Amino acid sequence: MGVRDLLTFRNGVHPPENKHLTEGVRSRRLPFPEEVILPLSQHIGTPARALVKAGDRIERGDVIAEAAGLVSSRVHATASGTVKAVEHWPHPSGSMQPSIRIEVDPHSTQMQRPRLVPHWDEVPPEQLSEEISKAGIVGLGGAAFPMHVKLRPPADQPIEVLMVNGCECEPYLTSDHRTMLERPEEVHLGIRIVLRALGIDRAVIGIEANKPDAVEVMRQTAPADLDVSVQPLKVKYPQGAEKMLIKAVTGREVPSGKLPASVGALVQNVATTANVARIFETGQPLIERIMTVSGRGVRNPGNWVIPFGTRLSDVIAACGGFTDDASEIVFGGPMMGQSQASLDVPVLKATGGILVLSKDECKRQDILPCIRCGKCLDACPVFLNPQLMGALARVDRFEEMVETNLNDCMLCGCCSYVCPSNIPLSQLFAMSKIQLSRLKAA
């Protein structure tokens, strides 16, 4: 299949990939730090409710916070040790969030307690989703939506196909790539389990064509009795957004304000899928993941298996420290990631990567007046009018932005990337969403 024949979606952008820094680096385990800090909010929805107090001895894998509602998720201890405190701590979102601080036992083997789980092929589908909920599984593609909720679609919106997202279209990030190369059997087993939970039998793995080794490995390791196909996709950002992936592979368009279930699809990240398999193979809940640490501002870029709650300072130290021209730290990718102001913030379930950018990689530019060139319209993958929305945001006309379909904006950053006037459109829209939520709550 030629490049012109690869499936894709309309619009989008082509930022420099910069994946060469880490795509060939096999993942290694980061040493356990002296302390882990686990926020009660590591997912979309209601924060978890702490079950421990200062002085409690806990083991790796123990439940330390319970889900506080349907759209919520458990938090498990990512290292054995003693609870130091349950207190507010700097969060990657920029706020102070209730968190559980654990002093890690330096003499522990960090082996988790044995955990009984049912044989995945011998239980009813609803029990599978319950076990996934108990393990604290959330989407690892960035949104951190509790997975058990996805596995219970409305009765009038049955799922027809499972779409496993291996696109990883964000520049620099290679953690999903390494997951497919290093843990393909876990991905396929996770697919089996999710298919059973949904009561369907068809899956598609979407992978951008800049990962030919991952395409080959996933095809070679696919079991003969599993109805799963591997679909190479055109390299374009944001191909990994679930609506874009569905459009490219199935031709179906998710209507405004609707979820993928409305067109019979469920999208799951490859790392999430692999962790589902790990629950039923080893009993291990979601307590760690492969993360990319990259950028020209860190001395040893690579892919690391990092326990959640590890402080940013400990991660950077394990990667050799900063280079002399390190300038900015971002959690996630450069398009949708969030800059960090403190080295004390912990990595979370949704932290797929940490970028340490050099001065040349994040050169500041003056913001100029909009020239109405229309480039942002041509780039927007969901066909919004970023120029008009940006003009409304800059004069605080947030209610009018709802009429321009602000809720459909996924903050992908395409408009900001192409703007010749350097207007931070995506940041304006993120701020507008926050202001609207505050107005609704008032």
Image (tube, rainbow, N blue to C red):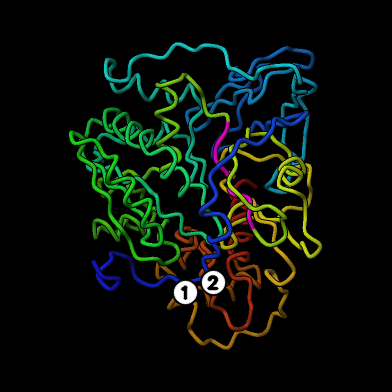
Q: Is residue 252 above or below residue 159?
A: below
Q: Name the residue at 61% across, 35% down.
A: 29
Which quadrant would residue 379 be assigned to in this image?
bottom left
The reply, left or right, for residue 245 in relation to residue 346 is: left
Relative image position of residue 311 (x, y in whole percent): 73, 39
Q: Is residue 76 magenta?
A: no
Task: Judge by depth and name the residue closer to the eye, 141 or 25.
Answer: 25
Q: Residues within 10 Å of mark 1 (few under 14, many from 20)?
A: some
Look at 38% across and 42% down and name the residue there. 268
Counting from the top left corner in percent of width and height, residue 59 is at 65, 15
Residue 290: in magenta span: yes
The dominant secondary structure in magenta is: strand
Under mark 1, the amino acid is Asn
Label 2 crowd (10 A; few <14 / some 14-19 / many >=20): many
Instruction: Give the left or right position of residue 58, taking residue 381 as reference.
Output: right
Cα–Cα span, label 1 and label 2: 6 Å
Q: Which residue is mark 2?
A: 389
Q: Quadrant location of residue 43? A: top right
Residue 109 drawn above or below residue 405? above
Q: Which mark is residue 385?
A: 1
Range covered by the magenta-colored residues: 288-294
Q: Quadrant of residue 424?
A: bottom right
Under circle 1, the secondary element is loop
Question: Could you say whether the residue bearing mark 2 is in a helix, strand or loop?
Answer: helix
* Residue 377 in picture, x, y percent from top left: 45, 77
User: How many badges with numbers are in the image?
Assistant: 2
Quadrant location of the N terminus in the rendered image: bottom left
Rendered residue at 50%/42% (across/down): 140
- Residue 143 on image: x %, y %: 51, 46
Mark 2: amino acid: Met
The reply to whether the C-beta atoms of the residues labelled 1 and 2 are less than 8 Å apart is yes
